[in-house]
Image (cartoon, rainbow, N blue to C red):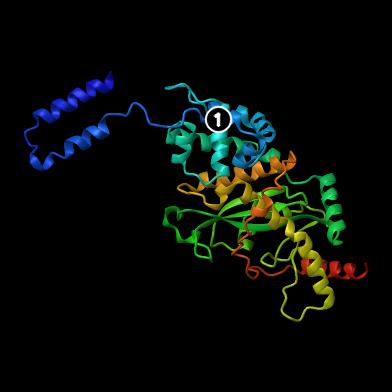
Amino acid sequence: MADNVGLVFAVDYFLEEEDIDDDDDDIVPYFFANFIRRERVPSIIIFYEEVLPDFSSLDFSKHFRLTRQTFTRLFQEIEPNLAKDIRTQGKQPILTEKRAMVGLWYLCNTTSMREISLLFGISQSTVFDCVHDFCDALCSVRDRVITWPGPQRKQEISDHFEAECKIPGIIGIIDGSHITLTNIPNGDQDYINRKGYPSLQLQVIVDHMLLITDSFVGWPGCTHDASVFRNSDIFNKLENGILNPHFFIIGDSAYPLKPYLMTPFRDNGRLTAPQRHYNRKFSTSRQNVERAIGLLKCRFRRLTSLPCLDIERACKVITACCVLHNICILLNDSVNDMLDDLPPNNNVNNYGPLYGNAPLGINFRNQIVQYLQTL
C-alpha cells in the first residue's frame, strides 16, 4: 500500500513538473524502473528443500568438501551461536541449517554471492549475512578447536616425530602462507606480495596429524614471515617459557633460530656431512605443514580467491576455514579424493632471516646435530 501511495506522488510530480523538456524524457523510465520494487526475483527455490536431500554421500562431499556426518556434528556445535543472529523482523527467517549450508558453500567453492543467491533462492544481502554469521559462529568456537597441546599431548606429538625423523622434542611445525585476495584492500600497496598479487598472511603451527595448534592471520602480504611471527601471540608465549627445554617447534630458514624454534642450516655450499644429515631429517618432518596448508586451501577453495572489502571480515573467513579444517581432522573426515588437487604452498616471503639467531638456539641445534651422529 505504501509503495502505491509513493507511486501516485511520483506520477503527480512528473505530470505537474513544467521544467521537464524533451531532453529529460529518458529520466522518466529510469526513475520508475528504480522506484517500483520488483515483487519477485527469479531464483531456484527448491535447491535446499528438494535437491540437497537427494544428494548422494559422494555428491555431498564433493560440493561441501566434508561428509554429511561431519556437517551434522559441526551444525550441532555452532547452532546455538548461529541461531542468535536470526532476524526476527520482516520476512520469515531462514532455517538455521540452511544458513549454515549457505555459509559452508561459500567457503568450499569460489562461486560469487550472486550465484549462491540464485542457487539457494535468497537475496544477495541474505547470502552476505548467512556467510558472515556462519563465520562468526565458527570463530566463536575457535579456542575450543584450535588448541595448544597440553603436557600429555606434547609428548605424543614428540614421540611421533622422533619415530619419523629421529629428532626428539618436536611438538609442531610453523609456516606462513599467502591467502590470495581478489582486490587490494583500500588500495594499500602493502598487501602486494613479492609475486605481485595482493594477499593476507596466514601463520599456522601444525602437528603430525596436520592439526592446526595455533593460527594467526591479518598481516599484509609484503610482510616477512619472521615479522609476522614476532607480532603473533604465540611468539610472546614462547618467549615467556610456554615450552620446557625438552620441547620445541621447527620452521624454515626465514625464521630466527631460538631455543624453542629450530631451523635448518642455510646451504652455502660448505655444510658438513652432519649438518646435511640434520637438514635431511629436518625436511622430513617439515613436509607436514606444507601438506596441512595445501589441504586447507584444497578443501576450502575460497582461500584461493578471497574478496576483501573489510580486513576484519576477511580474517574471520580465514579463521573459520582453519576451525573447519581442525573439525574435519578431529572427526577423521577422509579427504583422500582431494589430495591429488593439493595446490602448492606458495610461500613467497620465504627468504633470508630478518632477525639474528639466538646463541642459545645455535647451541641447541649443534647438540641435536651431535645427537644424530650417535644414532
Amino acid found under the numbered disc labelled 1:
Val
Q: Position of residue 66 (x, y in %)?
A: 66, 40
Q: Quadrant of the image for the N terminus? A: top left
Q: In this view, does 69 lie above or below 178?
A: above
Residue 239 seen in render = no
Q: Specify whether 4 is left or right of 21.
A: right
How crowded pointer 1 is (Cα within 10 Å; few <14, some 14-19, many 20+) is rated as few
Q: Depth check: 298 or 239 in front? A: 298
Q: Which residue is labeled 1 in the image?
A: 51
Q: Specify whether 273 is left or right of 64.
A: right
Q: Which residue occupies the extreme right position in the image? A: 374
Q: Position of residue 2 (x, y in %)?
A: 27, 20
Please count the marks in the image: 1
Q: Quadrant of residue 319?
A: top right
Q: What element carries label 1?
A: helix
Q: Where is residue 300 in the image (x, y as percent from the top left)?
A: 60, 46
Residue 55 seen in render = yes
Residue visible at 87% across and 53% down in the picture: 159
Residue visible at 45% across and 61% down in the picture: 189
Q: Depth check: 100 or 69 in front? A: 69
Q: Position of residue 131 (x, y in %)?
A: 52, 37
Q: Is residue 16 above or below residue 175?
A: above
